[in-house]
């Protein structure tokens, strides 16, 4: 009994030390949960006119050259998973070849996992027309330029001013519309990030508008001081219905028209073909995964991929 009682006291003491746990002493009050090891701040962007919820997690001690940084779009939903995956792998760093990492989640200050309207504007490239966007025309589109300026000209310097970061080891992860933005960023400003983790990009959007960025890609890449490494992935059931689902001709037709799998694979092939010089591009198809589940696999393997890249890059240490 004494041992059990001592353990209870220890657990209570630890709970009282937990960040933000101001109601820990009350047994009948539910308080908002907090992600262990993470911090957040609301940052306003003059470029987009929006407030962003920025979450930060440090994994390990900073290397001599500063932390490599992974920016995670749709951070409200995906940052907690990314942080837990990276922290979990770093706990057994030798097994996973894990290296220190700073994770930055970019989300919205509205208490939701996804702000569908805000991301529709922030993550889509400017277009002559949005009539064929395949989405609700009540939404606004085409704000990728403004969001890119916020990300690279404002947020990154703000992070660097408070945390020791390696400016040459910056990575970007995006899924769906976030993947569309990541691909657009790669094609139009490849120098902005060293690593691009592109999960199920919505290449179909607005009659494949993002493919218009390809013709100038080789020229922009040649002018970049570094050659980025790219990882593109998609899920098997993003282009066809999962076999356990009932027949749905309308949805099947939409999935076939969007061709998420084929478009992602062809984008990876085209990046390599048009780069002018060999460009490290990895493509992975996840069997049995849908648009709603594949991001989790892409994050796990993407972080592993980042760790492997860092192991072979002396600038990362």
Image (spheres, rainbow, N blue to C red):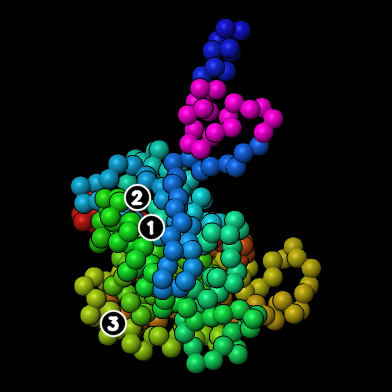
- Which residue range is magenta in the image? 11-29
As drawn, 27 above or below 65: above
Local secondary structure at mark 1: strand
Principal secondary structure, stretch drawn in magenta: loop
The residue to which callout 2 is attached is 101
Cα gap from disc 3 to disc 2, whole angstroms: 28 Å
Q: Is residue 20 magenta?
A: yes
* Residue depicted at 32% across the width and 69% down the height: 153
Crowd rating for badge 1 (residues with CA inside 10 Å; few <14, some 14–19, many 20+): many
The residue to which callout 3 is attached is 220
- Taking the image as drawn, is residue 248 in sight? yes
Badges 2 and 1: C-beta atoms under 8 Å apart? yes
Q: Quadrant of residue 316?
A: bottom left
As drawn, 271 above or below 34: below
Q: Which label belongs to residue 70?
A: 1
Where's the N terminus, which quadrant? top right
Q: Nearer the viewer, residue 286 or 193?
A: 193
- Left or right of 52 on screen, residue 23: right
* Residue depicted at 38% across the width and 67% down the height: 151
Cα gap from disc 3 to disc 1, whole angstroms: 23 Å
As drawn, 45 above or below 317: below
First reached walking from the N terminus: tag 3 or tag 2:
2
As drawn, 33 above or below 282: above
* Residue depicted at 45% across the width and 68% down the height: 198
Relative image position of residue 4 (x, y in whole percent)? 58, 13
Relative image position of residue 110 (x, y in whole percent)? 58, 59
Crowd rating for badge 3 (residues with CA inside 10 Å; few <14, some 14–19, many 20+): some
Local secondary structure at mark 3: helix
- Left or right of 190 on screen, residue 295: right
């Amino acid at each position: 009994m004494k041992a059990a009682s001592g353990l209870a006291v220890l657990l209570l003491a630890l709970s009282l030390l937990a960040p933000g746990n101001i109601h820990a002493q009350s047994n009948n009050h539910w308080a908002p949960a907090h992600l262990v090891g993470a911090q957040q701040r609301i940052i306003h962007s003059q470029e987009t006119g929006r407030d962003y919820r920025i979450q930060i997690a440090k994994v390990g001690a900073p290397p001599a050259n500063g932390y490599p940084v992974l920016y995670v779009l749709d951070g409200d939903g995906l940052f907690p998973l990314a942080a837990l995956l990276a922290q979990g792998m770093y706990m057994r760093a030798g097994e996973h070849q894990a290296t220190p990492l700073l994770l930055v989640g970019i989300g919205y200050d509205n208490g939701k996992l996804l702000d569908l309207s805000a991301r529709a504007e922030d993550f889509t490239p400017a277009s002559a027309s949005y009539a064929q966007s395949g989405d609700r025309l009540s939404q606004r589109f085409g704000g990728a330029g403004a969001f890119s300026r916020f990300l690279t000209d404002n947020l990154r310097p703000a992070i660097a001013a408070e945390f020791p970061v390696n400016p040459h080891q910056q990575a970007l992860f995006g899924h769906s519309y976030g993947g569309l933005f990541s691909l657009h960023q790669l094609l139009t400003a490849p120098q902005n990030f060293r690593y691009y983790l592109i999960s199920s990009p919505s290449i179909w959007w607005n009659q494949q508008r993002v493919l218009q960025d390809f013709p100038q890609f080789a020229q922009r890449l040649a002018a970049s001081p570094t050659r980025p490494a790219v990882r593109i992935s998609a899920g098997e059931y993003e282009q066809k219905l999962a076999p356990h689902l009932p027949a749905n001709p309308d949805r099947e037709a939409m999935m076939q028209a969007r061709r998420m799998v084929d478009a992602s694979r062809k984008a990876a092939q085209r990046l390599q073909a048009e780069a002018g010089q060999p460009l490290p591009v990895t493509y992975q198809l996840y069997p049995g995964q849908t648009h709603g589940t594949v991001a989790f696999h892409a994050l796990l393997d993407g972080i592993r991929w980042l760790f492997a890249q860092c192991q072979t890059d002396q600038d990362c240490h």
